[in-house]
């Protein structure tokens, strides 16, 4: 049967749950009533939705790192050490768990114990089980979110939410297209309907859990409209299952005006589509991800990328910022590198926070362009699905109407090519089958032509490749020569 954007019945959820909880032995410790009691007893300061609501009301931007190691004691210590430097905490999940390979995660835990150091690239919550995860939550004084990249996160959601995590990242599109090669999109959307329905059940008991679709996707030259469309669809899918606290995300592109416009348009668009589909009882917030592409190796240069992201997030008015670290180019950061990324970001947030809202014609124009692009794609998605956005999303990827640059999923067309313009904003070089309006396509073409003239070369795939490498090599735009650089690289 074709996927439908329809709230799962309790009976369907319950019978599926019995299967899900049997997929690894720790599943048998999941118990809904004790989960509800636990969340009820938890202090407000440890609840993610409360932190977001307070930040949104006060115009604050919450700081969040990424962090995860294999063993419970070390992971707890890491988060305790990071806690004074941030507002909300993460638990970044290891790659085996993301692929439901719990046997291998278990071996990773055992080897890490023997080696006395983490040999996994994150924390494996399913293996540590409800008890282990509860001890983690009990040892921390701030809200904790699960951050991963899992097409089928059903068991992970059951275990972590039962333990007291109060925010869950991901979605059926955003944790498939950029992460998996051959998981059918219909299947991952269906698995995420289960996760969202679970969160809906918590909501029915008066327990609010934050849901955050993963905004940046591949993090590589993704035009704002392309990631916004995914974020909006995943927001709508979550609302249908009864989630009510939605945080939509976006990854820094690098041009300040476009980045500010992206976050501002994301809020406007969410209100528009949530209301169009009949949802009015929800809490909305936004999250800005510092640059998700390649980073400079040099730590001093990395701080500059981090700081530009912090400035964009604060000028844009994002509710939360996820920080990078000066170790980004080399792998999983140490606690100290993570702390440095947080401190550099906090300084910038404070300095921008002391200034009034930045309004320029360029920001207004970029906002209008993004909104028109999103409306054009969304209209087609809705039309393809005959009003059903789950179905529409599957058909839109098959048709190339939704198309994410550099994504590994075989269903992703990869016919849309992005490129930077002469000002560093991300434009559409080849639109593939994305139904962008003609005047918008002409606008992109004109902007790209300006750059081609300036560089004395035709826009080409080489230019795109140069752009992908640019930031790690110290510039925003991949120019052919370094003649006009401000520094002696
Ligand atoms: N600890 C800290 N950061 C992590 N990332 C991935 N795993 C971890 C971890 N265990 C970061 C990467 C990259 C982003 C996608 O997540 O460094 O910045």
Image (cartoon, rainbow, N blue to C red):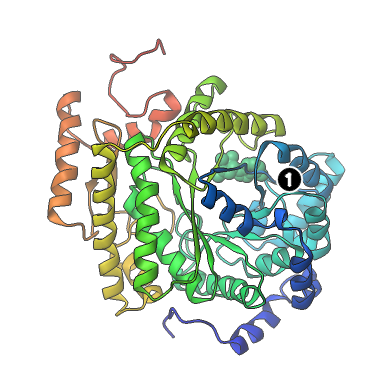
Mark 1 C-beta to ligand 1 under 8 Å: yes
Dot 1 surroundings within 10 Å: few (below 14), some, or many (20 or more)? many
> Mark 1 — residue?
69
Residue 37, position as x, y percentages in the image: 78, 72
The N terminus - image quarter: bottom left
Above/below status of 479 relative to 273: above
277 or 181: nearer the eye?
277
> In the image, what residue occupies the spot 54% across and 20% down?
300
Q: Which residue occupies 38% across, 29% down?
A: 470
Q: Is residue 446 above or below residue 208?
A: above
Residue 51 visible, this orientation? yes
* Whether residue 427 is visible: no
In front of the other: 158 or 395: 158
Indicate left or right for 326 with 312 as reference: right
Residue 65 percent across, percent down from the top left: 62, 41
On the rendered structure, is 314 left or right of 465?
A: right
**Please, which residue is most extreme toward the top here?**
488
Residue visible at 86% across and 44% down? 114
Place of residue 307 in the rendered image (x, y in percent of width and height, measured from the top left)? 49, 29
Check the image and name the residue furthest to the right.
114
Depth order, front residue of 38/69: 38
**379 horizontally vs 136: left or right:** left
Q: Position of residue 109 (x, y in %)?
A: 79, 51
């Amino acid at each position: 049967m074709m996927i439908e954007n329809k709230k799962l019945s309790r009976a369907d959820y319950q019978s599926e749950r019995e299967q899900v909880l049997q997929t690894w032995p720790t599943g048998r410790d999941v118990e809904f009533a004790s989960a509800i009691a636990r969340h009820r007893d938890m202090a407000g300061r440890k609840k993610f939705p409360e932190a977001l609501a307070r930040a949104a009301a006060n115009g604050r931007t919450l700081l969040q790192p990424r962090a995860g190691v294999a063993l419970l004691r070390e992971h707890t210590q890491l988060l305790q050490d990071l806690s004074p430097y941030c507002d909300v905490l993460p638990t970044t999940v290891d790659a085996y768990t993301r692929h439901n390979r719990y046997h291998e995660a278990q071996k990773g835990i055992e080897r890490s114990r023997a080696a006395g150091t983490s040999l996994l690239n994150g924390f494996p919550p399913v293996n540590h089980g409800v008890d282990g995860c509860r001890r983690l939550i009990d040892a921390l004084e701030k809200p904790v979110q699960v951050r991963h990249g899992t097409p089928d996160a059903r068991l992970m959601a059951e275990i972590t939410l039962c333990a007291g995590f109060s925010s869950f990242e991901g979605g059926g599109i955003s944790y498939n297209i950029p992460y998996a090669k051959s998981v059918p999109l219909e299947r991952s959307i269906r698995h995420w309907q289960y996760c969202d329905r679970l969160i809906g059940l918590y909501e029915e008991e008066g327990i609010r859990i934050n849901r955050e679709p993963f905004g940046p996707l591949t993090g590589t030259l993704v035009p704002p409209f392309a990631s916004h469309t995914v974020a909006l669809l995943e927001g709508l899918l979550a609302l249908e299952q009864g989630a009510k606290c939605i945080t939509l995300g976006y990854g820094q592109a690098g041009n300040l005006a476009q980045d500010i416009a992206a976050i501002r348009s994301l809020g406007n668009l969410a209100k528009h589509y949530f209301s169009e589909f009949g949802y009015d009882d929800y809490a909305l917030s936004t999250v800005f991800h510092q640059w998700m592409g390649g980073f400079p190796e040099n730590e001093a240069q990395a701080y500059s990328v981090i700081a530009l992201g912090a400035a964009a997030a604060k000028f844009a008015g994002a509710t939360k910022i996820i920080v990078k670290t000066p170790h980004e180019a080399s792998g999983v950061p140490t606690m100290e590198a993570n702390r440095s990324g947080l401190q550099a970001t906090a300084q910038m947030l404070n300095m921008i926070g002391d200034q009034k809202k930045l309004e320029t014609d360029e920001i207004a124009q970029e906002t209008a362009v993004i909104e028109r692009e999103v409306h054009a794609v969304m209209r087609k998605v809705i039309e393809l699905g005959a009003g059903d956005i789950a179905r529409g999303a599957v058909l839109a990827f098959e048709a190339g109407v939704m198309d994410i640059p550099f994504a590994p999923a075989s269903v992703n067309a990869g016919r849309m090519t992005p490129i930077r313009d002469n000002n560093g904003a991300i434009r559409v070089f080849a639109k593939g089958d994305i139904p962008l309006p003609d005047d918008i396509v002409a606008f992109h073409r004109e902007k790209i032509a300006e750059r081609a003239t300036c560089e004395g070369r035709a826009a080409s795939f080489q230019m795109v490749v140069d752009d992908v490498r640019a930031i790690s090599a110290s510039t925003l735009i991949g120019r052919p020569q370094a003649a006009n650089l401000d520094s002696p690289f």
